[in-house]
Image (cartoon, rainbow, N blue to C red):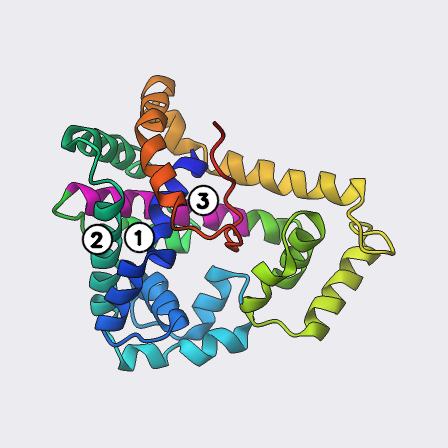
Amino acid sequence: MWMHYEPVHAVTYFHPRAQAAYQAAGLRGYWRGYFAGRAAPLGPTGAAPVVAAFYNFAPHMVTRALPAVWQLATPEEALRSRLTGAVQALAELTYELPERHLAESTELLEAAADTVETAGRVLGAANAALPRGEYPLARLWQAATTLREHRGDGHVAALVTADLDPVETLAWRVAVDMPPQNLVGRGWSEQDWAQARERLAARGWLSADGEPTERGRAGFRAVEDATDHAAARPWRALGAQRTERLRELLEPIARAGHTVIPADSPIGLPVLPG
């Protein structure tokens, strides 16, 4: 299901209309819009909670944006901008779909999002508490975002439990399956990367030449399994039949979303099969 609702959310990072909406609010430059839009549900926060919640950014990168962005746009303005841009993006991507298709997709995705457990999940809770949008695409995007951040909070908890720090996590992904240029924009120095690889090797996750070991693969599989387990409650609540119906409905929307997500996106979102 993540592969089907993540592309709905991700238009906010990659579609030109989403970027234009942030710029219109005074948030010029990609990272100002990113940090303001994603952090806005938390209110006019400083950098520290965002460093913790976003997890994989170097602290100095976050402090360059926060709290300074709130002088350019308030959290309320940033929320309006991110929703406006996301809705405009989805409208462009889904204009060929019947209204009833979008309405049913929204109803089912909201039903799943309404059941998320927010205890211990800061970003999931903050997004779940936002007012419901007036129009189907606004509601669809917000439901996808709540589910996405809820799952992300659980993933961070699994990483912390596995004692993987942010740059170690990124270094592991590069060692396994992601080109390094996809993740260098997180603000970590070459020394940070090198030391993270050394720590992964010391714990037996990487070999001396930097290749993933079976111990490392098993350890990270446990992280992914814990993430999936922690994200499963909404789908159990929705039930197998309605979950499958939602997957079918989201399929063309997700495929449309993939058309604006770069192949080298740091999200690491697999292309839908077929």
What amino acid is at disc 2?
Gln
Q: Which residues are magenta?
A: 136-156
Residue with the mark numbered 2: 88
Separation of disc 3 and disc 2 at Cα?
Answer: 25 Å
Q: Residue at x 22, y 51 (%)?
A: 87
Is residue 99 or residue 79 the one in the foreground?
99
Q: Secondary structure at mark 2?
A: helix
Task: Check contact, mark 3 vs mark 2: CB within 8 A.
Answer: no
Among numbered discs 1 and 3, the one appearing first in the sequence? 1
Residue with the mark numbered 3: 151
Q: Magenta residues: mostly which secondary structure? A: helix
Q: Residue at x 85, y 52 (%)?
A: 207
Instruction: Report crowding for label 2: few under 14, some 14 to 19, many 20 or more residues within 10 A (C-alpha).
Output: many
Q: Residue at x 22, y 72 (%)?
A: 25
Separation of disc 1 and disc 3 at Cα?
Answer: 12 Å
Residue 56 in view (yes/no)? yes
Is residue 25 or residue 55 the one in the foreground?
25
Q: Secondary structure at mark 1?
A: helix
Residue 79 location, quadrant = bottom left
- Residue extending farthest to the right is 208
Residue 154 percent coordinates (x, y)? 49, 46
Residue 126 percent coordinates (x, y)? 32, 55
Residue 117 in view (yes/no)? no
Residue with the mark numbered 1: 127
Among numbered discs 1 and 2, the one appearing first in the sequence? 2
Q: Does 176 lie within the magenta span? A: no
What amino acid is at disc 3?
Arg
